Amino acid sequence: MDAEDEATGHMIEEEEIYVNGGEDGDESKRHRPIISGEQLDIEAYAALYTGRTKISRLLFIAEKCGNASMQLDALRMAYDEIKKGENTQLFREVVAKIDGRLGPNYGPDNAWADAVDRRAELRKEKLENELNAYRTNLIKESIRMGYNDFGDFYFAHGQLGDAFKNYVRTRDYCTTSKHIVHMCLNAILVSIEMGQFTHVTSYVSKAEQSQDALDSITIAKLRCTAGLALLEGKKYKLAARKFLETGPDLGNSYTEVIAPQDVATYGGLCALASFDRAELKSKVIDNINFRNFLELVPEIRELINDFYTSHYASCLEYLGNLKANLFLDIHLHDHVETLYEQIRNKALIQYTHPFVSVDLHMMANAFNTSVSSLEKELEALITNNQIQARIDSHNKILYARHADQRNATFQRVLQTGCEFDREFLETGPDLGNSYTEVIAPQDVATYGGLCALASFDRAELKSKVIDNINFRNFLELVPEIRELINDFYTSHYASCLEYLGNLKANLLLDIHLHDHVETLYEQIRNKALIQYTHPFVSVDLHMMANAFNTSVSSLEKELEALITNNQIQARIDSHNKILYARHADQRNTTFQRVLQTGCEFDREVRSMLLRANLIKHEFNLKASRKH
Amino acid sequence: MNLNMNSVETLVAQIHGLSGSISDINQLHSLLKQSEDLFQSESTRLAPLLTELDPFMHSLGYLYILDACTSAPISKEQASELVLSIARFINLCAAEQIRLAPDKFTSVCKRFKDQVMLLEDPMQGVAPMLTAIRKLQLSSEHLTTLHPDFLLFCLLAKCYKPGLSILEDDIFDVDQPRDFFLYCYYGGMICIGQKKFSKALELLHNVVTAPMSILNAIVVEAYKKYILVSLIHVGQFSISFPKYTSSVAQRNLKNFSQPYLELANSYGAGKISELELCVQAHNEKFEFDKNLGLVKQVVSCMYKRNIQRLTQTYLTLSLQDIANTVQLNSAKEAEMHVLQMIQDGEIYATINQKDGMVRFLEDPEQYKTCEMIERIDSSIQRIMMLSRKLTDMDEQLSCDPLYLAKVSL
């Protein structure tokens, strides 16, 4: 038993060295987990907050944690906290949630609730009378105070909408910019509780307009609330910037909304997910203000440093440990997955960036994952054009690859060109036979399938046609089309073309399609040819002619046309009947284009000047005739 | 009568006296303008007076008297003498003085042109006209009324070189739209004669896209040539006009040049036989327009274009295949074409005569030489100059009261 433990411990240590490139021996000495993936210490957590947010957060945890004892803990604390205040409605809700599980001490204390309600009635009446008196006397400042009191009253009793209305109403009676800032802060507080983050943004900008009345604490408050609003709107980069701008004066002065620890967590994660290396260094790691916040959450600090110093395994481990707790955060829980994915992708991209070729085994180790799942991840990133590289799946090596502008443009052109087809594919399956006076569902399959084959690239074909569940229902009605699409996708061109040949006679008899059959067939055939040649450096024309069931010489003609139209980058060795892929020399073509553009510009400008002169002359002519 | 005679004499004396300093010359200029009627009435008797004046020293006075005495109609015998004397004056006169009376100078030159045409000896006009242009021009960007006449002489005399020297200047300043149209049209023809197709294309393009309110014959002829030249030089012709083309031209030009558009169409199809059929069909029309030579060039160009296209698709190809694809009669003929094109630097290839294979190569230009850098640099300099000009023009236009008045209406 002991021996085994030792062995695993040893293995971990070894792996750790390997993981981080094996470059430093002090790696193992670096202190490791402080954070535990263990349960959140709710008491400590709740102590960070005051006011309503404390209750909301506790209730949120109770709802999300999925762990009975933790849930009860949270509810108990929420119960205690509510009892300090006057929000009877919330009180009743909590009591219902506790459902007697915490014993008689946490039962529905009706006496207390009724007393509070009665007191609230009285107070409301008093406030109304006061406010009316102020309004008749038209003393601005008093009216403002009156509305404010009303706002406070409603807020305390959990009527957030009314509270918001009253706070906003004070606006007409604000006489100094200090009042306006005060009004804005109140409105922001209520809006955050209501989850109305658009209000937050607008009141933050309103408050920021009265620069003179802002002290550093208020500025810090506004920054972090703006950050919250942006976070909520999924604008992570902007949110990160706002959090990073939050001044250290914030301290514990805004616990009714946010704890300084939260600033560090939110800001740090958003920054990791959205900043590039340079920005990360300058705005986060070298940011003295923000460092004060980071000190409060050492895990975040460590993981940012790990990320920056490329210790991805340890960084990802920290993130993994934090994840469960972050899911319990009222503001962050919705964004955790997105942020984590972005951070992981960023890490993958950053890792591959300096390499010409990357050994996937090494990389999988560094990211603590298996080669095959890493391959999947990389594939997704390459497909989304976030990494310029290609995977050698045989030798498990990733090769960097220079962006091919031409192909990208070509792809975009194709994409724009097929809006038409999409309309077909978006036709819902419930169409059924309900529209037979115009079109049969079989036709949808035929038209859509052929148009898609003729115009989509491989990826689009896969995602929009083959994996399209709606459309599959249609395809089932015309198995030939389904088969030929699959054949096309799996590169069985001969069989695909045979299906097409069999269908042709019938398609020519279709009222809508007959005009387009030839064009579509030609495009599909061309696409097949292009797709066939794509992965090769050299292609034997005899083999290819076999695959397409045609003769070498006619294949040569077809290829010639495609090459002339720049659809295949290759040249034919007609002597040996081999097709050689040809890589356009970017540098030379660029030079050529530059020279050409220069000449064109020269000519254009001169003729433009001339025309301008002629027109001007004409003006003068007419004018002089008038005089 | 006597008085008149006297005053002509006094004028000559004044010309003698007031040809020194600039202020004197200005005074003389106004004096001469006042006595224009006098010159008119006395025109027949003025010729001898010219001998008393020195064409260089007294250019302005000489010009007025010369103008007056050439205004009368002259017989053919006198013509050659007159041509000589005007040519002598053009060669000797002082540029600063004649620029004071550009109208007079142009009218003298126009008469010179008429006489030379009468004598049917355009060669005689080339050199004096060039001098006249250079003296009349305020800058090399200025298009004078004499430009088209000069180019016409060059064309008629088949003496294209001097014409090219004028065409190399960038023209921005134009007095008369008609001059401009003619200048570009003649210029285009000269460039075609010299096989400078890109320049020709540019000039003809200027004619076709120039702002105009009514269509004229020059534009129509220019458009026909424009189609042919772009087929020869670019290998294709786009039927659509650039958007700044005047609406008159856009609407009407195609109606006047149907055979040419058909030719362009059949050229686009890339088949020699079709092209030749089309040429046959419109042979008379082409000949009538005197464009048959150009049309023949279009046809021969198609072979080259097709061979060039093959270099894009093939690494190696047999001569026989080349002959088949571009519809030449034999492999031998194909070899001649390929050889010619290699020599002209139009394609990069090597011929292996043993097995009759042509191996196409890539463009050897690596854009690494000093010459290339210099070329790019000079091109950049030029473009910077042009864009400065453009900014100037823009500023001028936006300050032009006439323009502003028109825009604000």
Image (cartoon, coloured by chain):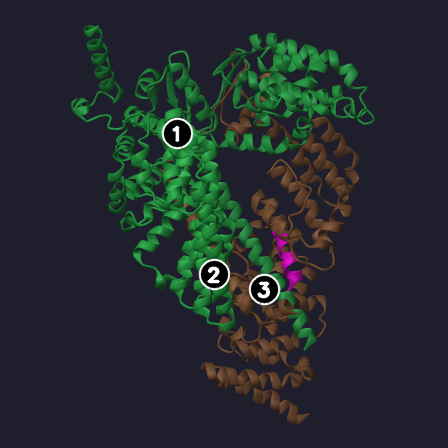
* Closer-to-camera residue (B400/A617): B400
Residue range of the region highlighted in magenta in the rendering: B175-187
Judge whether residue A195 is colored magenta: no
Image colour for chain B is brown
Query: Which residue type does callout 1 highlight?
Result: Leu
Q: Position of residue A163 (x, y in %)?
A: 48, 53
**Location of residue B224 with respect to B69 vertically, above or below:** above
**Chain letter tied to green:** A
Residue drawn at x 70%, y 37% as measured from the top left: B264
Q: Position of residue A299 (x, y in %)?
A: 27, 32
Q: Label 1 neighbourhood size at 10 Å, few (<14), some (14-19), many (20+)?
A: some
The residue at which mark 3 appears reads as B144
**Location of residue A400 with respect to A150 vertically, above or below:** above
Chain bearing mark 3: B
Instruction: Give the foreground label among 3 and 1.
Output: 1
Residue at mark 3 to residue at mark 1: CA–CA distance: 106 Å
The residue at which mark 2 appears reads as A126
Q: Can residue B352 be seen by looking at this rendering?
A: no
